[in-house]
Amino acid sequence: MLLALSSTALAGDIGGGTPARGVYVGLFGGGGSGSTGSITQSGTAFFTEAAGGPLSVRANGRSDSSGVGLVGLQVGHEWSYGSNLMPALEIEGFYLAGKQRAALNNPTNRLPEHKFDDTFPMNNAVLLANVVLSFPTSYQTITPYIGGGIGAARISIKGADSTQTHPLEVGINHFNSGANSSSWGFAAQAKAGVRVALGSNAYVFAEYRYLFVDTTDQTFGSTVYPTHVATTNWAVRFNDMSHQLAVGGIGFRF
């Protein structure tokens, strides 16, 4: 659709420049991939003294890159600054859903191997304040732009699972007494895209985004099974989550 609109715009060059949007709202959605720089799972397993005493666990690893989807809303105001620049201030909120999975290793002299396979379904809310710079062209219907912003992300995890794979513990989720957790983290993004006018008051847009979420700490419940040694609650640290996103949407100016 964007290619067809762009072809129409090129044919309709009127040489008058692109007008600023003033107040505008936009709806958007898209998808991409997300990953975490590293994940650390920490806790203590209370083995008896006859079995060697309490075992401190600090398992580390990196997450696989996995698919994510998003949907959101933006509200902003754009004005003209000379003939070559249109700055805008924008508030944006979106919902981002995906799943992080990681293989974690806990080096210890007590066991030849101590490894976990963790899964973290994430439903995240992101709120950002952006600065967007648009660049008028001689084609009123085509406007490229770049932008960036900072804000916060609410990282919500529901149904987390931590399975010990070496030594194998079948049917044991180490987070079973509390598999849900949430935490706030600093968020920042950069984006670049193009808008194509559908008329005087509506437009569509397509863009690339890079979203960064700083380190967050989550707390999950202890391991509670009749056949498993008791543990403390589990602390999981997610370091520097990154998302590569392709986004499209529709906007309206007022």
Image (cartoon, rainbow, N blue to C red):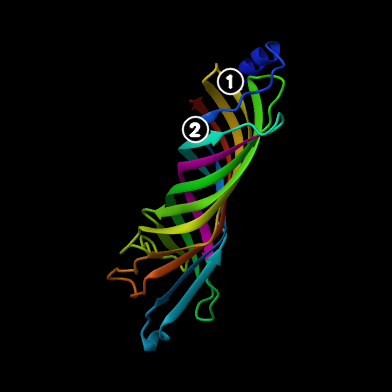
Residue 135 sits above or below residue 229 on the image: above
Q: Earlier in the sequence, mark 2 or mark 1?
A: 2
Q: CA distance from mark 2 to mark 1?
A: 16 Å
In magenta, the rendered stretch is 86-104
Q: Disc number at residue 175?
A: none
Residue 34 percent across, percent down from the top left: 55, 48
Q: At numbered mark 1, what does the secondary structure look like: helix, strand or loop?
A: strand
Residue 190 sits above or below residue 137 on the image: below
Residue designated by label 1: 197
Amino acid at circle 2:
Phe
Amino acid at circle 1:
Ala
Residue 212 percent across, percent down from the top left: 57, 52
Q: Nearer the viewer, mark 2 or mark 1?
A: 1
**Residue 11 or 3: which is nearer the viewer?**
11
| Residue at screen point 53% across, 60% down | 103
Asked if the residue at tag 1 contacts the one at tag 2, i.e. Cβ–Cβ closer than 8 Å, the answer is no
Whether residue 246 appears in this view of the structure is: yes
* Crowding at mark 2 (Cα within 10 Å: few <14, some 14-19, many 20+): some
Residue 158 percent across, percent down from the top left: 37, 53
Q: Where on the picture, by quarter, is residue 80?
A: top right
**Residue 224 or 67: which is nearer the viewer?**
67
Residue designated by label 2: 28
Q: Is residue 94 magenta?
A: yes
**Residue 160 or 97: which is nearer the viewer?**
97
Q: Is residue 216 left or right of residue 210?
A: left
Q: Where on the picture, by quarter, is residue 230?
A: bottom left
**Residue 96 or 118: which is nearer the viewer?**
96
Task: Name the image quarter holding the N terminus.
Answer: top right
